[in-house]
Image (spheres, rainbow, N blue to C red):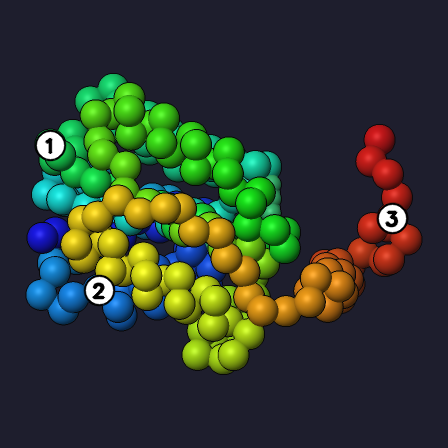
């Protein structure tokens, strides 16, 4: 079995999508052949070769405005119009992460990938949606609050290895909502200050 792990984050390093793909990869059978594709940097020939040989796609991406990042949409469109030719019978698994606490936010993006599968003649496998995704950027998946995410990735790996269809899973770290929101606000403030903005700049409405 050949698996292509597709990173649909525009970040070239330290993406949460990449971190989650790395953790998932550890659960996949060692004998399964793997190719990695980072959509943002993939040249045409590289993407075509990785896709053409893959029995299984694992498409990981961040939720952007309740949907898919635009460069990933363009990439998927290439498969619909035949510029990239997927292997017949290939099965698509989807790993979405989002910044808000609630993983259910990812439902529309999952529906969009299911529609893509229909259009491109691919089979749907399963989705795992991870709420409060940025936590995976600073908390190792082995730590207790991340247990629900680690466990979903383990279950996901079993579906992928057996090319089974599974119920979509919506998970988030085991952390109270108010604590997550508080630490996200602190992170935004720190980033704004580092970029030379004051807190009142952040509160100012655009326009
Ligand atoms: C342009 C943009 C749009 C986003 N839209 C949403 C959104 O609609 N809902 C949400 O929960 N998070 C949203 N996020 C947050 C990302 O999904 C989140 O930071 C994610 O962890 C990034 O994953 P990555 O590191 O793999 O790129 C958005 C982030 C950006 C930069």
Q: Residues within 10 Å of mark 3 (few under 14, many from 20)?
A: few
Q: Disc number at residue 66?
A: none
**Mark 1: which secondary structure?**
loop
Q: In the drawing, does residue 142 fall left or right of residue 105? A: left
Q: Position of residue 81 (x, y in %)?
A: 25, 19
Q: Residue at x 27, y 64 (%)?
A: 25
Q: Is residue 31 visible?
A: yes
Q: Position of residue 79 (x, y in %)?
A: 25, 28
**Mark 2: which secondary structure?**
loop
Q: Disc number at residue 88?
A: 1
Instruction: Quote the CA–CA distance across marks 3 and 1.
Output: 51 Å
The answer to whether the beta carbon of the residue marked 2 is less than 8 Å from any atom of ligand 1 is: no
Q: Position of residue 141 (x, y in %)?
A: 45, 73
Out of 42 and 21, give the one closest to the viewer: 21
Instruction: Quote the CA–CA distance across marks 2 and 1.
Output: 22 Å
Of labels 2 and 1, earlier in sequence is: 2
Position of 68 relative to 147 (above/below)? above
Q: Position of residue 123 (x, y in %)?
A: 23, 34
Q: Disc number at residue 28?
A: 2
Q: Residues within 10 Å of mark 1 (few under 14, many from 20)?
A: some
Residue occupied by mark 3: 203
Position of 125 relative to 134 (above/below)? above
**Mark 3: which secondary structure?**
helix
Instruction: Quote the CA–CA distance across marks 2 and 3.
Output: 45 Å
């Amino acid at each position: 079995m050949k698996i292509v792990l597709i990173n649909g984050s525009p970040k070239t390093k330290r993406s949460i999508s990449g971190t989650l793909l790395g953790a998932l990869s550890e659960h996949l059978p060692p004998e399964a052949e793997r190719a990695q594709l980072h959509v943002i940097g993939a040249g045409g020939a590289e993407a075509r070769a990785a896709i053409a040989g893959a029995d299984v796609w694992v498409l990981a991406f961040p939720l952007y405005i309740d949907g898919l990042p635009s460069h990933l949409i363009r990439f998927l469109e290439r498969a619909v119009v035949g510029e990239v030719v997927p292997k017949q019978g290939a099965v698509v698994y989807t790993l979405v992460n989002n910044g808000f606490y609630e993983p259910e936010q990812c439902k529309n993006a999952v529906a969009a990938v299911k529609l893509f599968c229909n259009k491109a003649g691919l089979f749907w496998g399963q989705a795992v949606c991870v709420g409060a995704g940025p936590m995976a950027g600073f908390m190792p998946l082995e730590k207790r609050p991340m247990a629900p995410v680690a466990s979903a990735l383990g279950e996901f790996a079993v579906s992928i290895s057996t090319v089974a269809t599974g119920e979509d899973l919506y998970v988030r770290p085991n952390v109270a909502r108010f604590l997550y929101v508080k630490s996200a606000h602190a992170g935004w403030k720190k980033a704004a200050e580092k970029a030379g903005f004051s807190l009142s700049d952040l509160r100012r409405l655009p326009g």
